[in-house]
Amino acid sequence: ANGGALRAACRAIDCRAAAEDFFVIWLFAICVLGVPVGFLLLWRIPLCGRSRADSMLPVSIIIPARNEERNLTQLLASISKSDYRPQEVIVVDDCSSDETAFVANHLGATVVTSGPLPYGWTGKTWACSQGAETAGSELVLFLDADTYFVPGGLEQLVVAYDKLSRTEVALSLLPYHVMCAPYEQLSLIFNLLMAFGAGGFGMLGGERLFGQSLLISRDLYVKSGGHAAVRHNILENFALSSRIKDAGGTCVCLGGFGVLNIRMFPDGLAQLCEGWSKAFADGAAASDRRVLMLAILWLTLMCSTFLLIPLAPAGWHVAYALLYLCYVLQLVSSTRQIGNYSVVTCILYPLPLVFFFAIFAQSLYRRVFKRKVTWRGRSV
C-alpha cells in the first residue's frame, strides 16, 4: 500500500513537473513571437533617393510658426542654401510672443500674420489654411518649423514627388530625428510607434501622412477640403489622409534620412513630456486596429522578456538573455532608419519603454477625462 502511494505521489510530481516545463516552454515561445511581430510592424523605410531632374516643379513652402524664432533660423537657412529655389516661402506667424515674425522677414520669407483663432480650429490647421490661401504655386509644401533640410534635401524631395508621375499624390516624409541631449533618447518608443502607425512601412496598415511635412498639389488639396476640413483635429495628418483618399488621391510616405531632419524637443525633458503627451492617446485611437493590436503585443512581449530574465526557472536565464539581445538588435536595425538613436539606448530599452507607458497613461487619462494640455502657451 505504501509502495502504491509512493508511486502515485511520484506520478503526481512528474505530472506537475511536466506541466511546469510545458508552461515555461509555452511562455518562452510567446516571447519569441514578438521578434517577427516587430518586423511585421516595420520592415524597411523607403527613401527619396539621390537622383536629379532637368527641370524642377515650382513649389510654395508654407511654415506655420508659433514662438519658433530659434527653429526658423535653421529651417530658413537650409532652404536658402539649397540649389533649388522655391517659388516662395511663407511663414504664418501664429500669434507669437517672441521674434518669430522678425526672424522670418529678416531671412527672406513672406510673413503672414494670423488672424484670431476661430472657434473649432486648432492653431496649426488655422495657420496652414491661411498659408494655403496666400500661396501662389500649384504645388504646396507644408513644413513644421522644427524641421530642416540637409544639403540637397529639398531638391530630392521635389524630384521624388515628380517621379511619382501623378498629380493625385500627397507625399509625406518622416523626418530623421536628430538628438543632441541624453534625455531626447527617451523618444525611442514614441518615434517607432509613429512610424508604425502612419508610414505603412510594415506588412500591415496603409500609408497615411506624417504631421511634419506634406507636399501636395493645390488641386488635390482643394478637392480634399484642405485643413479647413480637419480644422478641429489635433492630429490633422491622420484626418487629412482620409480626406485625400476619399477625394481619389494617394498618400505616399517616405523616410526623411538624407533629406529632412528634425530636432523635436531641444528645450528639455519637460518639453519632451508635454509634446508626446498632448495627443498620443488620440493617435492610438486613430491608428489601424491591426497595427495597434500588434504594437501592443510587441511592447508587452519586449517588456515580458526583460522581466523574465531574473525570474525564469533555472536553466532558462541564458535563453531569455539571448532573446533580449534579439530585441536589442531589432531595435538597432529599426531605429537607425528614423533617428540617431544610440546602441546604448537600444540595450537599455526598458528605460524608454517605462517612460512611454507613463506618458501614454497620462495622455490616456487626459483624453478620457477631457483634460487640456498646454503646448507653446496654448491649450490643446
Image (cartoon, rainbow, N blue to C red):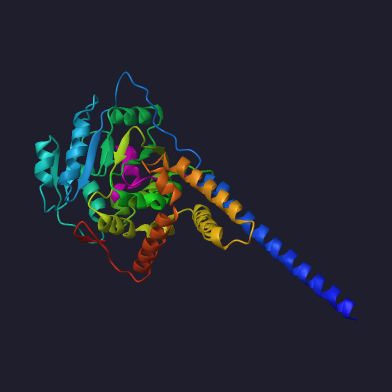
Q: Which residue ends up furthest to the top in the rendered image?
A: 54
Q: Tell me if I can see residue 367 in this picture.
A: yes
Q: Tell me if I can see residue 247 in this picture.
A: no
Residue under the point 32% across and 53% down = 230
Q: Which residue ends up furthest to the right in the rendered image?
A: 1
From the viewer's side, name the closer residue of 170 and 64.
Answer: 64
Locate the C terminus by quadrant. bottom left
From the viewer's side, name the closer residue of 347 and 192.
Answer: 347
Find out whether residue 219 is within the magenta segment. Answer: yes
Specify the quadrant of the image occupied by residue 270: bottom left
Find out whether residue 213 is within the magenta segment. Answer: yes
* Residues drawn in magenta: 205-227
Specify the quadrant of the image occupied by residue 262: top left
Position of residue 119 relative to residue 84, above or below, is: below
Residue 187 screen position, x and y as percent: 36, 51
Position of residue 50 relative to residue 187, above or below, is: above
Residue under the point 38% across and 59% down = 355
From the viewer's side, name the closer residue of 167 and 174.
Answer: 174
Locate the N terminus by quadrant. bottom right
Residue under the point 50% across and 58% down = 303
Report whether 263 appears left or right of 43.
Answer: left
Position of residue 378 relative to residue 323, above or below, is: below
Q: Which residue ends up furthest to the front in the rendered image?
A: 2
Residue 112 screen position, x and y as percent: 14, 44
Position of residue 160 relative to residue 227, above or below, is: above
